[in-house]
């Protein structure tokens, strides 16, 4: 896998979303997947969003992760302009705490799919993992890393269960 070519593009509608979307970047770093990250708005900078989307694909990008809040349609607009898989992350915030962003991201019209994650930081982390799973189909070494990652999760649960059983739930 080439280190120089960003395989994943991460875009968010506002720099205020960075603390959540950084979770996707952390996952990609953990799996040593090159990515680029930017801010672009489907509504305030539609030309920039389209140009960035085209650039990611032209430069060998394989997956796009798009995070936006307040019923923004960033992931959907991007999905309408590319054949790359698009993963949407609804950002929590605003008067509806991200529920509006969830609906805007998940309720795509037939023919324009967007893989939608949970609202907020957990969804951003899962978007990074989902991107790794997509890339693992092309890069088998990522499949091995995913197996190791899942084993680590499994072992962590076993350790917590053993600790709880050892001390009893009242002392946990």
Image (cartoon, grey):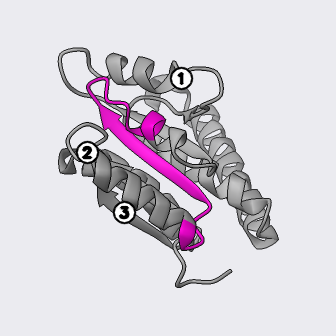
At x 27%, y 44%, the residue is 41
Q: Which residues are magenta?
A: 58-77
The answer to whether residue 144 is above or below residue 130 is: below
Pinpoint residue 45: horizontal percent, then vertical percent.
Answer: 23, 47
* Disc 3 from disc 1: Cα separation: 24 Å
Pick whichever, 147 or 76, lies toward us: 76
Disc 3 versus disc 2: nearer the observer: 3
Q: Position of residue 38 (x, y in %)?
A: 31, 60
Q: Which mark is residue 10?
A: none
Quarter occupied by residue 5: bottom right
Which residue corresponds to the image point at 35% horizontal and 24% vertical from the top-left? 101
Name the foreground residue: 23 vs 147.
23
Instruction: Locate residue 116 relative to residue 124 in the image: left or right.
Output: right
In the rendered structure, does residue 69 fall within the stretch colored magenta?
A: yes
Question: Which residue lies under the disc numbered 3?
Answer: 37
Q: Which residue is mark 1?
A: 108
Residue drawn where x is 76% and y is 70% of the image: 139
In contact (CB < 8 Å): disc 1 and disc 2: no
Residue position for label 2: 17
């Amino acid at each position: 896998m080439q280190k120089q070519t960003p395989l994943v593009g991460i875009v968010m509608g506002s720099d205020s979303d960075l603390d959540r979307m950084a979770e996707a970047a952390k996952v990609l770093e953990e799996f040593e997947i090159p990515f680029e990250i930017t801010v672009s708005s489907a509504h305030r900078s539609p030309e920039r969003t389209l140009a960035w989307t085209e650039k990611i694909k032209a430069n060998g990008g394989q997956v796009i992760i798009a995070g936006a809040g307040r019923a923004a349609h960033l992931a959907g607009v991007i999905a309408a302009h590319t054949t790359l898989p698009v993963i949407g992350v609804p950002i929590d915030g605003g008067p509806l705490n991200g529920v509006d962003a969830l609906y805007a991201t998940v309720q795509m019209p037939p023919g324009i799919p967007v893989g939608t994650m949970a609202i907020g930081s957990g969804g951003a982390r899962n978007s990074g993992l989902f991107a790794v799973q997509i890339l693992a189909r092309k890069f088998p070494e990522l499949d091995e890393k995913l197996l190791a990652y899942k084993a680590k999760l499994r072992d962590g649960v076993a350790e917590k269960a053993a600790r709880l059983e050892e001390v009893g739930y009242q002392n946990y």
